[in-house]
Structures are given as C-alpha cells and as structure tokens.
Image (tube, rainbow, N blue to C red):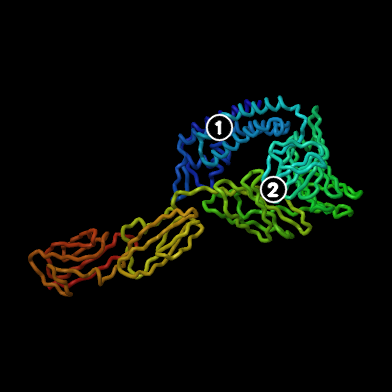
Amino acid sequence: MKILTIAFLISFISLDVQAQTPVSFSSDKLQQISQRYAGSSLNWPVVVSLADHNITNNTFTLSSGDLLKLRSLTNSTLVFEDQQKRTNKLIGEGATIFATNQLNDTNKLFSDYLDEIRNGNLENALVISERFKPSVDALERILNNNRLVSIQAQLISKNGLVDKRLGLLASWNEAFVGDLFEESHGVRTQEESYATLAFTDGSNIIVNPSTTAIIRKSRIDKLDKSADAEITLVEGGLLSKLSAVGKERSNYVLNAGNSTTELNTQNFLAENSGGTNVRLSNYDGEAMVSANNVIVTIRKDEGTIIRGSAAPLPPVKLLPAPKYLTSKLDTIIYQNDFLLNFEGVSDAVNYRVEYSTAYNFDENVVVKEITNTRILIENLPLSTTYVRIQSVDELGLKGPFTDKFLVIRNQDTKSPPIFGDQFDQKVHFVLSNSVTITGVTEPDAIVVVNGENTKVSGSGVFNRVVSLESNDQIINVTSTDGSQNTTRKELRVVHLTEEYLFKVKLDGLDIKEDISAANSAKTITGRAFPEMEVELKNGDTIKTVKTDSQGRWGVTMNVQQGKLSITFKANQTGIETLSKSYTVK
C-alpha cells in the first residue's frame, strides 16, 4: 500500500509539472513554492538556483524546464525521507553499535545530500540520492550479522580530552572513539570536552564538560533487545537521550548524589557539583526520583533539587524557552559575526546559549551564560552554525532548549549593486548648489558618498545631500558588503545657471541685450553641457540643436527684426527649461 501511495503521488506530481506553464512568485512565497514543486520547503536553495531572479521587484520565475527538473528532486526527496525512516528504525535495533562504520557512511550520504541541497546543486543531490537505498540495505545486512556482540556501550564521539578507566581501581587513560565500555568502567571529560556513549537500543548518554561517570550495570536481553543500564554521576552533568525503543522497553537508572532516578524519558539532565547537591531537569515523559526515603515524579518540563540528606523538592515547573525575534529559524550571512536577539522570559536569572557546527551539539560546542537578551556570535566559520538557548531560574534549573537556529555563513564574492535613476544618466542636472543622491543597495551594505558614511534603510534605500563646490562636479558613491566586496559609481552633477549658459556669441562676438537685424545668415554659438538641447526662435524660424560631448553648440540662421529667444533644455525629468530673449532691431 505504501509503494502504491508513493507511486500515485509521484504520478500526480508528474502530471502537475507537465501541465504547468512558467511560474512566477515573490520571495515570501519561496518555501510554499518549494513545498509544492520541489517536494519539501527545505529544498528552497535549489529552487533559487534554478529560477530567474528579478532583483528590481525581488521576484523569481521558474521555466517549464525548471519545473521538470524539480520533479526529479521531488522523487529523490521521497526516497530520502523513506530511507531516513529505515535508518532510524535500524538505529533503534542497534546499528549505532553493531554497524558503526556503515551507519557513518549512510549518515554521511544523508549529510552530503543536504549540503548539496543547501548549496543549490541539483545534479549532485540527485546522484547522491541514487546511493541511499543500496547504503541502507548494506546497513541492515551488517547489523543483522553483528547483532550478537555482547558489549553494550560505545564511545561514538568526543570533543577535547576524554579519559576511560577499566575498573574502579584502575588508572585513567585517554579514550578514543570506538572504545567499548562494560560494567564498572568509567568515563571522564575535561574542561570544554564532550563525549557521547551509545547503547544498543539507540539511546545515548551525553557527557558534559568536567564530568566523571561510572557504568555500574550494562546488560542486554538479546531476545527482546532491551537494555538494563545503571550509571552513576560522580560530578558534572549527564544528558540522557533515550531512544523510543529504550524508553518503551529498557530500564535506565541514573544515580547522582543521594538520588536514584528511573528514566522513562527521552530527554533528561542530571547535574552534580561534586557533592550531594543535585539538580534534575526532565524535558520529556517522566522520571521517578528517589532520595532520602522520599519519591517524587517529575514530568515533562519539570525539575527538582536534592540538597544533601533533605528530601527532593516538590516538582518545579521549568521556565519556558526564549522566543527568537524572527519567525524564520535560519539566516544567511556573509560576515564573520552575527547578533542574535531573543525575547526575555519572566523570572529568568540568566540564559544559557550553546552554539556548534555539529547538528547534535556533540562537538565544537561553545557555551555562553548571559543575563541580557542578545548575544554576538563571533568568528563564525564558513559553514552552518547551530544555536540554541535555554532559560535558567533562581534554583539553577535549566528549562528546555529553543528550536535550533541556523546561522549559515557563505563566502560572498559578488559586489552589492547600486541602483537609481541618477546613476543611469551620463550627466545629472540641478538648479541649486546642492544635490540629493538617492539609490538602492543591499540593506546590510555600508554606503559612502563623497567620503561620508550614509545610512542605509532596512529596504536598502540611501539618501545623502551633497553641497556642490563647482558647477560641474563628480560625486563618488561606494557600497561595501560584509565580505568587503565593493561597488563604485561616479555621478557627474552639473549646476545649471544663466550666467554660464547664456554666454552666447554672434559671429564670434558676445551678444548684448540688443541685436542688429541682418538679411544674411549669421552663426550663433555657445557652450553649455553634454546631454542638453538648445532651441532658438526668431519670428517663424525655429532652430534646434544638441550639444556635443564637450557641451558646445552652434546654428546658422537669418536674424530678423523682433525677438530672438534661446532656450536650454536638460534631457532629465523634473528640470525646468532656462530661456532668455534678446531684442533684434
């Protein structure tokens, strides 16, 4: 039935694409269009790479050929999602331990595919998608062959210095990814170090920095694949991430200080400062906490504290996660730093911010504790950085994390554009001794007009009033983005004045207010500016001439008794004509 459903969906999409004419849409419809024509809203980078982008009105157009290409992406998306579900099921059956290398290969295929999608590389993504099913088939085969391994826990990732102890009386030695842990083995992380222990049912224990933990019990029931594990937190912090199978079938017990907790949750944090004071926070399901002959049950988004020999505090409601001040959970930047703002939470004492280049926050994790509602993340690498935030209350209990916020830093080699009617003109004319330079560029760009930094609005518009030092002046405008790509524009600005324009000559002599009539042709000349038109009118005679590249002009005409009017016209909207009349006697 599943195969028939997928086949019907593909057939339906195929017919829809074939029937489509080119599709145009605005940028705010990008994810909706990606969902409809590319199979997923996450495929928007491919849609952008295929579509023609009209920068002026920020719209995109997909041709019929583009829509046909996106049909293949829709098919590969279905395959990707189906094989990911298979892989998650195999992880629940022990692939993390029994087929580590093949699982890593499969996950790398998924990661490479998503990278190509994020980079808009359709053809590369399609090639990778063809390898999904063979890779997952191999994963299932290797898992089934190796499932009889008796070791339960394995170090699957680490960041920084991590140690292992093979028994309670043994010495500590450096641990390596792939090491196996049995009962009575210990794991220890140093400052700013992380480790992840994986169990056969797909559950993980994340060992936070400066933490020591001991595996007291580690067993597996090979018949129903359930685990029976008991871990003691000596000091530091442990984040238990039980799989769905682990939560349903297995028995996980966590000891910390004087407390013992039975976990029926997929997300549980225990913190022990090294003594008998313990903080426990639960983010899913429920956990039964026993300490000093008192039992309390903490449910989702609840916590408790055990101080020495005292009973656990009644369940405390954890503070909610802060909210980002943007509806989108990702942003693309081209500079090294990014300022993230969020909405504060009432009663929060401080906020804990984590960011990492690893999606699961199991390596390269930076932790910042702040009291305000903004954080500047500096020195971002050219990749995706994942950010999450949690609120901390007066008891030190940490609330649930926000959704991951993605900061995607790209290398930008394209200079920001500068648009504006003024910049399309060879000469810009004004009738005063100042000019307002107006244009549009990228909103985050730095604009400099004649050496003066100029404010850029959120829509990219900038304005700057420049005083003219001469009648004919060059104004320099630059726009520089965060990657230091710069666009330069020069604008020639001319201040039109009667004093300059009406230095007119008749047969080489300056024209006065009165001119003598003549039956023979006379040559009238002058000098204005390029891109202008001069009109001379004497009785019924009208002569029109354009200025040359130097602004020079000249006409030959008979000058009759009456009036001779000379009019200068600038080839520019909004500039009035300048006229002057002479008396011909």
Numbered mark located on residue 199 in the image: none
What is the three-letter code of the residue carrying label 1? Ile
Can residue 79 be seen by looking at this rendering? yes
Q: Which residue is mark 1?
A: 128
Residue 446, above or below 226: below
Between 356 and 115, the residue placed more toward the observer is 356
Can residue 575 be seen by looking at this rendering? no
Please, what secondary structure does the residue beneath circle 1 have? helix
Residue 422, above or below 102: below
Where the N terminus falls, by quadrant?
Answer: top right
Percent across and percent down for residue 213 are 78, 45
The mark nearer the N terminus, 1 or 2, is: 1
Q: Residues within 10 Å of mark 2 (few under 14, many from 20)?
A: many
Q: Residue furthest bottom?
A: 513
Question: Quadrant of the rendered structure where residue 562 is?
Answer: bottom left
Question: Quadrant of the rendered structure where residue 43 is?
Answer: top right
Between 315 and 227, the residue placed more toward the observer is 227
Question: Quadrant of the rendered structure where residue 284 is?
Answer: top right
Percent across and percent down for residue 566 are 21, 67
Where the C terminus falls, by quadrant?
Answer: bottom left
Answer left or right for 506 relative to 27: left
Q: Which residue is mark 2?
A: 193
Distance, label 1 to label 2, CA atoms, is: 34 Å
Percent across and percent down for residue 337 are 56, 55
What is the three-letter code of the residue carrying label 2? Ser
Q: Residues within 10 Å of mark 1 (few under 14, many from 20)?
A: some
Please identify, in this view, whether the residue under mark 1 or under mark 2 is nearer the observer: 2
Answer left or right for 439 relative to 190: left
